[in-house]
Structure formats: structure tokens, C-alpha cells
Amino acid sequence: MSLINNILKMLSKNNFSSEKREIIKREFEIIKTLDEQINDNFEKQFNNNIYQYADLLALQNFFPKDENSYSGLQTLDELLERDSKREKDGFMRRIRLGKYIKEGNGNKSKVVVVPSTTEPKFYHDDSISEEDEDTTGGSGEGEEGEVIGQQQAEPEEGEGQGAGQGQGAEHDIGSEAFDLGKIISEKFQLPNLKDKGKKKSFTKYTYDLTDKNRGFGQVLDKKSTLKKVIQTNILLGRISQAKEFNPEELIVSPKDEIYRILSKEKAFEAQAVVFFLRDYSGSMQGKPTEAISTQHLLIYSWLMFQYKNNVETRFILHDTDAKEVPDFHTYFTLQIAGGTEVAPAFKLVNEIVEKENLEVDYNIYVFYGTDGDDWDNEGEKLIPELEKMLKYVSRIGITISKNSWSKGKTTVVEKYLEKTGLLESKADLIRIDSFDADSHTEEQLIESIKKLIS
Amino acid sequence: MEECKIRARDQGLRFDDETLEYIVTNRNMIELSPKGMIPTLYDYWVNDVEVLKGQGKYKLYPNNPYETVINSRPAISFYNDNNPDWLNIMIFYHVLGHIDFFQNNFLFKQTWNDDFVGQALADKRLIENLRSEHGRWLDYIIEFSRAINNLVGYFGDLLRNNLPEKFEKRDKINFYFENFLQDELKKDNLFIFNEINIFNNYLKNDEILGETLFLSDVKNKFPEFNLFYEKNKNVEEKSSADILEFIRDNSPFLNKDKNNWMKSVLNIIRNTSLYFAPQIRTKTINEGWASYWHDNLFRKDERIKGHEVAYAKINSQVTSISRIGLNPYAIGLRLFEYIGNLADKGKMNFDFQKINNIEQRDLYDKNTSTGKDTIFNVRRNFSDFTFLNTFIDQDFVDEYNLFVVGKRVNPQKRIYEYYIKSRKAEDYKDMIINSLYHPPIINVDIEKTKEGNLYLTHKFEYKQLIKEFIADTLIGIEYLWGNQVQLETTEIYRKTKSADKETKEYEYRKVLYTVKDKKVSKQNL
């Protein structure tokens, strides 16, 4: 329980304002309840459902082997169009995107993004009842009370959007992430993209009137055509060096007309590196994490689609310390840890940028997600880091996914950022958006992304 | 395959001559499984999307898409194109077990004359037509009807249509004793017994006119009785309808001429749901029955030669009792075998039940050999609930070494432990019955329902409804009803931390949800 010790250490430091104490206490409470949640989550996972058995599975081991089958019948675009019409008709949207499911056997699993939905009905809720523990059947030897099996206790978030699935397994992103990116790519473009360290794109082309063609084409190249006409007339002897000539008498062959023609060219693209930062402290448990992870997933999917090789992504998680994680999946799935200090994360970005000299060759973007709590409630440590960052960065996008207790209030992070005046003076470089985590919708998340990168 | 049918019939199984067998590929499966293997089921976009099942958390979707046999006329069954021949034979025996069950078990009576696949095709075409006319609004009607399709009154229908002919309904008399005297007048038992005595005397004196005379006597005593009875009769007739039926017949919105087409959609959704209802309620007994017969018939079939080991392996995978977990094949099969043995030894009588001595119980054998008749009787008249509730007893639990597995968290080691919680038959029975499909009971409250307000009441069975779905479901019902809808239900709250952290205390709060113009509000009652 190094976590709690860590927090206790923080608490033992005096000179804390009451507000700060309040935040730390809350975080502490949340972490204390984690054990209880382990128990609850486990009950939910427990499976004694006889209806999972079916003949085709049991007798023939036969089920659709293609894990993308669900989305095989209607395209994503059709489904999404239908969904947007729902809103017009005054009903809730039903299709949810960006859900990660895990399939496959053994510990080799795959993570894919699929459209998913629920069919709301009146169902019994088995998660709350008088019975204190869930039970199932069993058979064989053993006395009453004897332990016959055990399982590692990990708090899990259960099925749904966002973080919390598939620990410890190998992942790769399915092509659906590109689909997802495609859908949202129309809506965004990276802001303030500067020409830095251009490299030839393998995937993007531009179409330009660069090629010349005789006889036909889109635009007449007058200069070249005139040259050609003169050449022809020289050959024909109608123009000679000594004599004056009348341009009206020159013969123009159809072949002398030179046109510019549209052609495909490999484009040059600007390079960018995007840092994703996420607060994974105790207070982020549940909905706030779900919102942030989903939003970052959307941004990530879009980047993968739109910029492919030209965007590098880096992932950083923080509680009271910050650490870089190797890939999006770890970033996406890693579980809640301890207390909250924002500064270390930004400091780590600054260090990485400096060490790897990224500033020279890359446009740098930073997306940060938090619930708005910071134990450093004046931002004393964060502001200097932020100012340093603003010197090189193309855009910082901060998302605040508010917890229920800060609903309608200004969070600590918002407050001290407001105080610095950076939000106005550097409005082009830093954007902030906040919403209530409990009620976030996909549309809201996309709207919020627009605000961050507009 | 025809030979299999002959062998099965020799053993007493009864089923239609015609059956259809299809070899299916993986590609077919992708298309069939979202439709519950029924190729002609209506198209609906939800079938094209992955549906979040919330597995374990809530038991939302008890009907499994991977069934082998379709209960239709003729019955249809599916076989993987990679199966070896001997396996197909064994599966076919299993299939015949299911077909026999579908065509003889009483819960399926409503489906006995149905060519469901054909009916579904007609429905599918109708829905296609309506879709081309009304576009996405058709899909909304499907969606909102499906939102309440788990509340269809399957048992009500079964009772209404299958009341034994000689079962005479003494409506008025029953109402007088049960409702009027007890609920309305709140008379004490003495008064009621006296009345029963008077009634019996009337009957004794005059068997034919006794009832009428008694009722006129009642009329003198309680002049308001008849009026009260008439009023309640109407309520009762209406309230025996399930929500879908009630909305179909009474919704001011659906009764508008331009919306009349929606009623046929409601009907299709309701009938489809009713079709699946008996299957969900006979999972264990049906799989047990089919497993019993595939094993009995295939082992005697000479085509097993050379495949005995492979068969043994598959059969044990399917029917072995798990160390931890519930397998309907295994429990159902064991229970049929157990019942057969009991009956063979004549143990199915009170004399045997009175014996407490274990040794005597073991040795008891009247050699009645009625096992086979008995299991056929069980397959005809029992559902999962009655099957498990009637026959699971301590002898059964002991014979197969069954127990209830509990699990608890071990905070020191940070692990969960599975442990043997109980070997008592009653605990085992409770556990298995609790795992059965049981949708909430929600009915229309006729008295509180007016044209402008549909009032639904949820009968609380110590489980609350899943809260996150309530609002969306109500909005759908409001659309179908065309006006305000209210739902009375009970919610469970964990009491604020008591001093002792171990005990969780709950309180129940009655709440009323109201949906009006797609806005849902909640108030405490």
C-alpha cells in the first residue's frame, strides 16, 4: 500500500490550505474504497449463466470465426448516418464507437474498434441484492468451507467504453481504428502546422498543373506555346534573323499548343509529434477516465488516419509522478494509481523535447486530460513548466472531465490557469475545454476536440 | 439419417417425419447467428452491430444465437461443413431429442402448429414493405416494441389458451370469497368460514340452483356486490393483457388511422418474442433430454465403430459436470438419469420418502421398471423451474457430489477465493433456480391509467431494474402510447455506512418515473 503511504506523506506536510486538504482527503477516500470496489467488480464478473451454453458451441465448437462479423452487414457510414438522423428525430443516439473488445484465445488477444450498441429494456439488476456474495454450481471432492480455486484480484472497469480492458495481453490496432479516423478526419486539422523537417510523404499526393503536354490539356501555357510557334516558324523559314516579321502571318500548328496538365505528385508533409498526457490518479476512477480515454482515442485514431507516418505519438501517464508508456494500448488500459500532481507530466514532456531535440524537426502538440484536481493548487510548479512549453509548442489542448463533485464549479486547474492570463495572451497556443464526465457523449467529445484544435 | 429416426422412434421419441438438415459454412454463420439462426427473421439494424451484453454484470441476453435446432415445421438443424460423418450422426440424435422435446413438451403447445420459419418470412416481407413506405420510422417502432418484448405475458397466454375444458370457472363465487370479502370488506376468517359453510349447504340442498340461490342471498346481504363485481371484471380482463398487447389495443396514438400499420409491427415483435419464450424456459431440461438420447442412441448405433474414443471425448466435454460452474447439459442429463433410476426402483412415492435410514433408502427396490414412462412424462409436463425444483434433492446432490461454490475476497493476499459453500440440496436448488431466466414483472395499472397517462407498476422481487436503461425504455413506450407514461418501481440503496463495515444494509425506496415529451423525471413515493 505504498499508495496510501505516499498520500499520508503528503498529508503530513503542513502548510496546506484547507482547499488542498479537501482535495487530498477526497483522493484518499477514493483509494480506500478501491478494495471494496474490487469486491463489487468481481461479483459482476462472476459467471453462472447456463444460457451461455448452446449446441453449436458445445457439440460442434462452431461459431463465426471472423471477429469483425458484427459490423459486416452494414457499413459504419450507413450506421452513423442512421444515428445522426435519430438525433434529428429527437431520440438518443444509439451507436457507440471506439469501444475496445478483446477476442481470441489464450493470452494472444486483439483489440479492435467496432460500432456497438445496447438495447435498453427493463431488466433485473443483479449487481445489488441482499445476498452478500454470488454463487455458482460445482462438483467433486472437498469439505464445506474448503477453498478450491483462486484468482488474482484486479480492479477492473468492466465492459464499456474507455480504459480498463485487456491487461497483460498483446494488442494490435485493427483497421477499424482507421475507419474511426476517417469519420472524424473531415472535421479536424492540426492547427499551426509549420514547415519543419519536411519529408516526402509515402501516402499523400498532391495534384498540380505541373506537367506539360502538347495538343491538349487543362490550361494553355502561353509562354511555352509562343516559344513552340516561333520554333516551328523558324523551321518553316517564315522567321529569319535578319528580317522583321509580322506575327499575324505566323502559322500555328495544333501541335504547338502547349498545355499544363494535372498530375499526381508526392507531397511533402510537415512532421509533428503529439504528446498524450493523462491523469490516472484515484479521483479519475470511472467516468472521468472513460471520457478522457475515449477522447484521446478519437484524436489518436484521427491522427493515424490523417497523418500516418508523419505524426509521432508519445504517451505519458501521471499521478504524483509521471511516466512515459510505450504505446497507446498501455496508455489506454492502465489502471488508476495514486494522488494528483499535474506538473511532473508537463515537466517530463519538456525533458523529452529537450533531450531529443524535437523542437527543430517537429511541430509539437500536447493533449492533456484531467479531472481538474491538482494538489499543487496554485499551480506553482506547473506554470513555469507550462511557460517553458509554450515557447516551442504548436498547441496545448487541455480537457477537463469534471467529477460529480465539481459539477458546475471551476476546478483547481482551470482556476490557476485562468489566473496566469495565458489562456488569453497565448490563446493561439493553449486551449482548454471542460465538461461533466457523467454525462459526456461522443458528440460532446468531438465538439470538445474541435475546440482544442481549432 | 432416416435410420436414426427409426431407432429414435423405437425408443419412444415422437416427432414429425419431415426434418430439414443444412450444412453451414462459417460465412453462413456470420449471417445467421445475429438472427438466432432463423434465416427468415426480419432485418433490423441492431443485428448488424455488436450488442453490449454486460456479461455477468446483468444477465441481459439469455437467448443464445448458437442453437442447432429451429423449432419450426419442419424442424431445421445446422451442421458445420467440417464435421466428420460419425459426428453428424451423433449430433442428429441430439437434434432428434430436441425435436421430440419441442413437439411434445407442453410449454411449446402454442408452437405446435407453427411453421415459424414461414411465418417469419411473411413477417419479414411485411416489414420490408412497411420500411419502404415509412423508412426509419419503421425501425423506431421495432426498437420501441423490442424495448418491452421481454415483458410479454407468455404464461398468461399459455393459461388462457389451454385451460382444461372441464375446469369450470366460478368467477363470481371466487370473486366473492377471495376479493370481495377479504380485500374489500376485510372480514375476519370466522365470517368467511361461515359464508363458505352457507355456500356448501346451498350446494348440498340443490346442486343445480344452489349457486344462484346463494348469490341472491349475497345480493340481499351486500347490495353493492354486483356493481363491484362488474367493475372489477373489466379491470381484470384488461389487466391480464401484457404491456405490448395493452398498448396495441388501447394506445390513442396507434389507434389513429395513419398509425394503424404500427400495430402489425407490434404484433410481429410480440409473436417473435413469444416464440422464443418456451425455449428460454426449458434450457436445462431440453439439453438434458437431448444429451440423454444422443448418448443412449448413438452408443447403440453400429456407426460408432472406430470412433468410440473420439465420441467419448466429445461427449464428456459436453456433459461432464464442471468443478466450478453450471453446465445445463450435465445437470439436465444427470437429473433425467436420476429420475429414471428412482422410478425404476419404485422410489417415487410417499412410502419411500418417509424412510430416513440411509441404508434402507439405498436398498429400497420395488422393481417397478417405470423409469422410461416417468422420464417421458417429465419431458411432457415440466419446465426448467419445475424440473429443478421438483427433483433436486439431497440424494441427487450427494450422488453426483454437487455443491454450491461461493467466492470471497481475501484482502491480505489480494485474491479471490472460490470455496465450497454448501452441500445442502436446498442451497444448491436455490442457487440454480436463481440463475434461471426471470424477466421483471411489469403490468399496466388499469385504475391509474387514463388516455393521457399510461401507468405501469413493477412488482418488486428484491431486485431493482437496471437504472441506466429505464429512461430510454420509457421514452420508447411514450412514443408508442403517444402520451405521458409513468412507471412505479422500487430501488435499492445501500444504507450510509454503518459502524460495522462487514454488514451491508439496504433500504428499499418506492419511486415513480414519469416521462412526458421525452423528458424523464423521478420522484419518491
Image (cartoon, grey):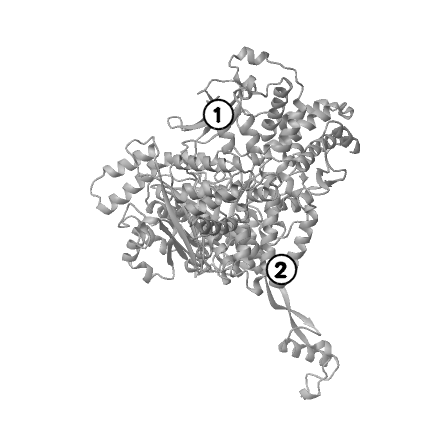
B301 over B176 or under it: above or below: above
What chain letter is assigned to the residue under label 2? B
Q: Residue lying at the far right in this picture: please name it.
A: B3
- Residue at image position (67%, 87%) is A247
Q: Is residue B13 visible?
A: yes
Whether labels 2 and 1 belong to a single chain: the reply is: yes
- Residue at image position (55%, 50%) is B146
The quadrant of the picture occupied by the N terminus of chain B is: top right
Depth check, front residue: B261 or A390: B261
Helix, strand or loop for disc 1: helix
Which mark is on residue B265? none
Which mark is on residue B131? 2
In-image side of B134 versus B509 (left or right)? right
Q: Residues within 10 Å of mark 1 (few under 14, many from 20)?
A: some
User: Where in the figure is residue B272, as x and y percent of width and height?
Assistant: 61, 48
Nearest to viewer (mark 2 / mark 1): 1
User: Where in the figure is residue B47, as x and y percent of width and height?
Assistant: 60, 49
Return the disc, 2 or 1, that comes first in the chain's sequence.
Answer: 2
Depth check, front residue: A316 or A37: A37
Q: Quadrant of residue B364?
A: top right
Q: Quadrant of residue B305?
A: top right
For mark 1, what is the residue?
B426
Residues at marks 2 and 1, CA–CA distance in whole angstroms: 52 Å
Depth check, front residue: B352 or A26: B352
Depth check, front residue: B69 or A46: B69
Q: Residues within 10 Å of mark 2 (few under 14, many from 20)?
A: some
Helix, strand or loop for disc 2: helix
